[in-house]
Amino acid sequence: MTNKNGLTIKAGFEKALAMYKDLGDVEMVAFFEKRLEQNAKRSSHSGERKLTPHQLENEKIKEGILDSMVVGTVYSIADMLNTFNCFPEGMTPNRLSALLSQLGPKGSQQIERIEQKGKVYFTLPTSDEYAE
């Protein structure tokens, strides 16, 4: 986590720790060493978090979208809501749009977003244009 000056919590604690070591303040040195240790412990768990039930449901929906789409066919959000059977009851266009954004060029790049006259369409790429 950085603030507007680009200083991370870890870097700030390390600076403070060095300053208090130079001053010889044993109590503050112990405090900042403990905080650095806690920060490192917290950072090490960031990749091990379990997905929430809502996130798991969204992942299933995204898989269903990819399975339902046909290469070369262009879909609007309304088309998807009306034709795909992978959505839970009460699926809204806004939620579908958010999930499609995660699959599109700004996300995992598994689908292509096309805008025509103010309307947005989605399709599976016909070539490996998104493959890296």
Image (cartoon, rainbow, N blue to C red):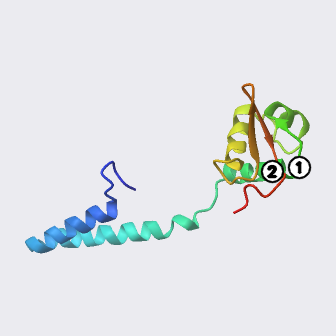
Above or below — where is 106 with respect to 77?
A: below
Amino acid tagged 2 = Pro
Q: Which residue is mark 1?
A: 71
Residue at image position (34%, 59%) is: 8
Q: CA distance from mark 1 to mark 2?
A: 7 Å
Residue sitting farthest toward the left: 23
Above or below — where is 120 with respect to 126?
A: above
Place of residue 90 in the rendered image (x, y in percent of width and height, measured from the top left): 78, 34
- Quick check: marks 1 and 2 in contact, CB under 8 Å? yes
Using residue 41 as the reference point, say whether residue 34 is left or right of it: left
Residue at image position (74%, 50%) is: 57
Q: Quadrant of residue 108?
A: bottom right
Using residue 40 as the reference point, say whether residue 82 is left or right of it: right
Residue at image position (27%, 64%) is: 13
Q: Quadrant of the N terminus?
A: bottom left
Which is nearer the N-term, disc 1 or disc 2?
1
